[in-house]
Image: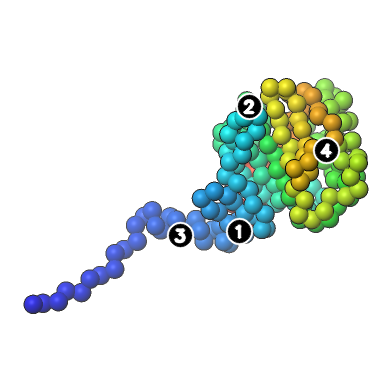
Amino acid sequence: MTNTLSRPCAPSRRQLLAGFVLSACALYGVKASASEVQLDGYSFPDTATVGGQNLVLNGVAASSILSTRSSVVGFYLPSKQKTMETATAVKGPKRIQFYMVRNVSARDLSNALLDRIRQNVSREEFGANIIATAQLGTVFSTIPRISKGDKVVIDYLPATASTEFTLNGQKIGDTIQGEAFFPMMMKVWIGPKVRDTTRDGLLGLTEAP
């Protein structure tokens, strides 16, 4: 009887694609699994529940709102969005979640958020939301500092047209009213004057660096 040698099967197109994705994720410091994405060691689940609705992770990115790499951030939306315009306009609950990767004073963080809003929204938009924006400046007023590893979550709840902040799972600051405020917060990270790498990562256009 003649023995036949079996040849290893050539990898399928799907296997090749999966290998490419894993290699790209390793190269850029992003680790993906079936249920979460990791950036700089911080986990972002693929889904989140806000206001009783399931949201999907739109993207993650490193952020340098304090001049140097200071946080890693993820956006959760009702459906995947690829542009600033559609991401800010999509109806339903939304979530911004970020982890600090270094210690910062609460005052510095508040000032950086306010500065980014001024840089990335129109004069008309800023003026129409001046009261809500002023409230943002007080959200972290009772906290001396935000430490490395702290988790900040900003949720928009359409049922009450309000934005709530939590730090490590504990509510901080007053609830900010108004449907127009949350899109301004989103523009801190995906506005026209934000670094391309941050914006593109959160819009799911590229892997985060």
Residue positioned 91% across, 48% down in the render: 144
Compare marks 3 and 2 and give the one earlier in the sequence: 3
- Mark 3 or 2, which is nearer the eye? 2
Q: Is residue 20 left or right of residue 95?
A: left
Sequence-wise first label, 1 or 4: 1
> Residue at coordinates 41% horizontally, 58% vertically from top-left?
16
Q: Is residue 69 visible?
A: no
Q: Where's residue 105, x and y in %?
A: 89, 50
**Is 201 situated left or right of 4 in this image?**
right
Q: Tell which circle, 3 or 4, labels the residue nearer the N-terminal end.
A: 3
Whole-number angstrom distance, CA of label 3 to CA of label 4: 43 Å
Between the residue at mark 3 and the residue at mark 2, the CA separation in whole angstroms equals 35 Å
* Number of the label disc, if any, that sits on residue 19: 3
Q: Secondary structure at mark 1?
A: helix
Please name the amino acid that badge 2 sits on.
Gly
Mark 4 crowdedness (10 Å alpha carbons): few <14, some 14-19, many ≥20: some
In the figure, 147 relative to 177: above or below?
below
**Amino acid type assigned to the residue bearing label 1 in the image:** Tyr
Q: Earlier in the sequence, mark 1 or mark 3?
A: 3
Q: Which mark is residue 172?
A: 4
Quadrant for the C terminus, please. bottom right
Three-letter residue code for mark 3: Gly
Of tags 2 and 4, the one toward the viewer is 4
Instruction: Using the image, tell me which numbered label, if any, was put on residue 28.
Output: 1
Mark number for residue 147?
Answer: none
Q: Residue 165: where, in percent of width, then height?
A: 78, 37
Q: CA distance from mark 1 to mark 3?
A: 14 Å
**138 to the left or right of 35:** right
119 or 6, nearer to the observer:
6
